[in-house]
Image (cartoon, rainbow, N blue to C red):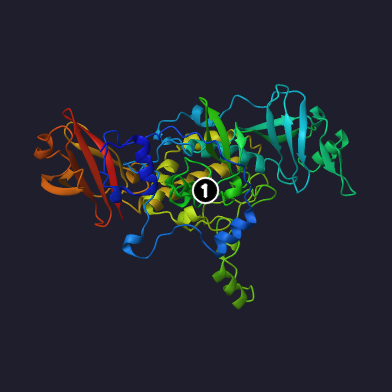
Amino acid sequence: MHTSRFQRTLLMALALPLVLGAKKFYSDDPLWEMPPPLDSTVVVSRDLSDFYDYFLYTFANPAEQHSDAESGVIPAQAVNTLGEVPDSQWFTNRIGHREMSIEEILRGPGNDRPPVAGSWTVVSAKTEGLTPGFMIKDSTGERYLLKFDPKKHAEMASAADFLGSKFFYALGYNTPQNYIVHFDPNDLEIAEGVTMIGQDGKPRPMTKLDVIEILERVPQKADGSIRALASRLLPGKPIGGFRYHGTRSDDPNDLVRHEHRRDLRGLYVFCSWLGHDDSRSINTLDMLVEENGKKFVRHHLIDFGSILGSASEEPNSARGGNQYVYEFDEALVQMATFGLRVPVWYRWNYKKFPSVGRFEHGFYKPDKWKPEYKNPAFENRLPDDTYWGAKKVMAFSDKAVRALVESAGYSNAEAREWVITCLLERRDKIGREYFSRVLPLDDFAVEGERLRWEHLGERYGVSTAPTIAVTWSKFDNQAETHQEIPGLGPDLPAAAKAGGAGDYFAARLVGDEPAKTVTVYLRKTAGEFEVVGIDRTW
């Protein structure tokens, strides 16, 4: 029975191939792009509660989790037969999948539509909190969120938010277009109907004087100008964020439980690298967009002001990335020692740059890093999820990291160099940590009747390649069984070369740790061999 691509997507999402008797590979494997989305006509906006998520994820867990039983491990879903994430409304393959020029990395989600210089109109305002914010409209009618740095930490939050949109976009996610802007406060006009809460607790019209007083709470340069982050509004209709468990019931395209998505499990690695401990549902946004006459939901990561040592309104605490907001065991220890036991991370000698906050690389341990509170997708990560993430982090060259950080406009050269150093050192720690969890062989291809690959640890200089033993089998795609055939080493065995079109063969690669293997599946077509699948054990 022929199965359409969209039906196959449903099967992959629901994890029912064995029940329905589906074969392992289809003629169009490996898929690198999900089918066009179904029309989403009943999606409704929703507001997520950070407090609800905090208590839910801290004291309960609504997600499907791995069990202790050997069969209880839940492999990542929304992946192709190579273990990679296909392009979708969630994710687009960029760095680590194809070459990205530094110019493309710097461009990010867009670098050609900053607010047009001149008079900007304030259409709404956030006046509470340590740092205010405005929604502005430029002379073309384009709208932007205008965010500011805390008074004593010029450049800190704006640089973090700017860089976050670029890094996460290059890594594959949908992010807003963020711009560093400098403006004269006198260029802000107030739209009719904009209000603020007066001293009597009642709303009243906002005035130009109110704007001047509000901006006195943010850093200003000697000439009176102000640096800010301008975040262009995302296209479409905002309908709330996504959770890191379950699915969105009103979205017909949201079929894979979020805690099992590789692009969300592997997101842990990227958040760990960049220090994004504020990676929670309220910092995501689903947009209902329309393209080619069809409406569907596109999923975004937003608000990166709390990365790279920043906590948006102040430098991040020493706890950030090292401990959840609440940990029962740690609370008991503190009670038993009357608070006299001081964690090592608290006593660490952090560099102090007002424009950076608290960011370091010496104490950083990639797999010990923690967000503010538990994240079900992060908790479900497996070695192949983190290996997938590490490949993308390691794909950032020294030049790319330097170019990105320099584009954020840090005025203190020493602070800028510190951010670059931290990112490069943390990057290499990630490679060493997660490449060691699996046999890090990749980029498989058949060239001249020989299977070739590359050891990524050796490519990036974080580990050495062991001697690889290769055994071969003929693979029955329908029954999913292997029959051993003569052949040792990377050269194609005689049985494979004599095989017919449509035959499948498998090479099992093992290094010096028997538990860590890679099985590479080849399909013969018109006298050639193509790599159609990869399985890993650890």
Which residue in the rendered view is the most extreme toward the top?
140
Quarter in which the C terminus is drawn: bottom left
Name the residue at 83% across, 30% down.
192
Quarter in which the N terminus is drawn: top left
Q: Position of residue 522 (x, y in %)?
A: 22, 38
Q: Position of residue 8 (x, y in %)?
A: 34, 40
How crowded pointer 1 is (Cα within 10 Å; few <14, some 14-19, many 20+) is rated as many
Is residue 432 at all visible to an observer of this figure? no
Q: Secondary structure at mark 1?
A: helix
Which residue in the rendered view is the most extreme toward the bottom?
336
> Nearest the camera: 488 or 128?
128
Q: Which residue is mark 1?
A: 271
In-image side of 445 versus 387 (left or right):
left
In-image side of 448 versus 124 (left or right):
left
Name the residue at 47% across, 57% down.
379
> Nearest the camera: 328 or 458?
328
Is residue 502 at all visible to an observer of this figure? yes
Q: How many marks?
A: 1
> Nearest the camera: 415 or 220?
220
Name the residue at 44% across, 45% down.
255
> Nearest the camera: 179 or 247?
247
Residue 79, located in which quarter of the rendered image?
Answer: top left
Residue 51, located in which quarter of the rendered image?
Answer: bottom right
Picture layout, residue 229 above or below residue 462: above
Q: Position of residue 455 (x, y in %)?
A: 30, 43
| Residue type, label 1 | Cys
Q: Position of residue 354 (x, y in %)?
A: 68, 47
